[in-house]
Amino acid sequence: MPAFDAFPATRYAPGSDLQNLLAPPYDVVSEAEVAELHARDPHNITHIDVPGEPVAAVEGAIDDDAPADADRYARAGRLLDEWIDDGVLVTDDVPALTIERMTFTDATGRQRTISGVLGALAVVDAGAGGVLPHERTTPKASTDRLDLTRATGANLSPVWGLSLASGLTALLAEPGELIGEVELAGAVHRAERITDPERIAAISAVIASDDVLIADGHHRYGVARQYRDEVRAATGRDDTAAEATLAFVNELIDEQLSIEAIHRIYSGVTAEALRAALGERFTFEAAPEPSPALLAAMEEKSALVVMWPDGAQEWLIPKPGAFDDVRALDGAWLEAATAGLDGLATTYQHGLDEMVGIVASGDVTAGVLIRPTSIEEIRRTAREGLLMPPKSTFFTPKLLTGWVVRKMS
């Protein structure tokens, strides 16, 4: 089972304006949002986590003959060191865990609070057990996160893990020492530090008693494994800080998760070809206009919805027995229905309004709205050692980057 340990966290100094310093994860912010965050404060965490090109303030700190991308990462590493030297970031005197609580209104209008804990999660080999993927990942050619980790020697954006052990939520109920509170995208994020050794030991023991399922950050965890292997090769040791990575872990139970769907967009084939492929396993019926009510009706009807560029939308109702040999996942159903459709390209999109705009543009063949994956199916996936199709889940709200930096060198 995976070790989960406290460590001396590096944080923004007490009294810092955290509202202007923290940021969403690097992989959910657009270029325009990064530019706005960079302009918001010279010490916003994105200056390190999503570094821009070198500027005059650090002239001479970087090899002028180095490639532009290398310059970016070298600058990020230098900035991190400067912020620590200047007292912008300070390091805890003792090992600590950090509770992050996220209070928000979910898609159904229900007020929710999700509570998890930030700590150092063991990095294990693929297939070794203990820390498990829950879906197949789409390839990423960029080495961005690995290059950034090498340059900074630090974990910045945490992996999100789901503990299959019982009792973690109860252990996190008692408040810790308040670090700060910020509001972002309608969610209030609150961080609390835990330094009591007995409480740390209890939390760590529960997480280490069962598997942790990666909810968000599969690529980050894969990069942590690559970095660990590089450090092992360079040092000949397997007891360095690279043996773990920064992770937020909460309990895999209904009240502690908010999951939304990531819909499918199809292109590269004609509408006629796509309709024929879907028609092998689904029947079509006219569906209402896209709206939150339609998404709710999909659950009641146990059906998907295909949206066409001409403004029409139709229910996709599974034919009896059509998916007896396929797991009860909308993404898996669509993979089965479109298998062998030459030229088909699939992309993924969260958000109903975004889907409507993309399909209406006429630049794609169609879009299909799917339903969120259930907690039961996520737990079953973990227990049976299975993998869901790519982009099967969208966990909300997104964690904030900047509460904790975990230095490894």
Image (cartoon, helix red, strand yellow):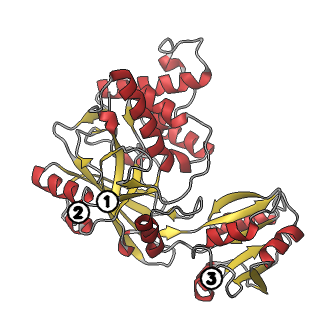
- Which residue position holds label 2? 172
Q: Which mark is residue 93?
A: none
Return the disc, 3 or 1, that comes first in the chain's sequence.
1
Quarter of the image where the N terminus is located? bottom left
Quadrant of the image occupied by residue 236: top left
In the rendered image, the vertical position of residue 274 relative to residue 402, given as above or below: below
Amino acid under disc 3: Met
Quadrant of the image occupied by residue 332: bottom right
| Residue 292 in view | yes
Q: Secondary structure at mark 2?
A: loop
Quadrant of the image occupied by residue 85: top left
Return the disc, 2 or 1, that comes first in the chain's sequence.
1
Residue 301 image position (x, y, % from top left): 63, 88
Q: Which mark is residue 116?
A: 1
Q: Secondary structure at mark 3?
A: helix
Tell me: 191 left or right of 30.
left
Q: Nearer the viewer, residue 247 or 328?
A: 328
Label 1 near label 2: C-beta < 8 Å?
yes
Residue 198 image position (x, y, % from top left): 10, 54
Residue 181 image position (x, y, % from top left): 32, 55
Residue located 67% across and 85% down the image? 321
Amino acid under disc 1: Gly
Return the disc, 3 or 2, that comes first in the chain's sequence.
2
- Which residue position holds label 3? 298
**Badge 1, how many Cα within 10 Å: few under 14, some, many 20+?**
many
Amino acid under disc 2: Leu
Tell me: 83 left or right of 364.
left
**Badge 2, how many Cα within 10 Å: few under 14, some, many 20+?**
many
Q: CA distance from mark 2 to mark 1?
A: 7 Å
In the rendered image, the vertical position of residue 348 relative to residue 320, given as above or below: above
Quarter of the image where the C terminus is located? top left
Q: Nearer the viewer, residue 357 or 302?
A: 302
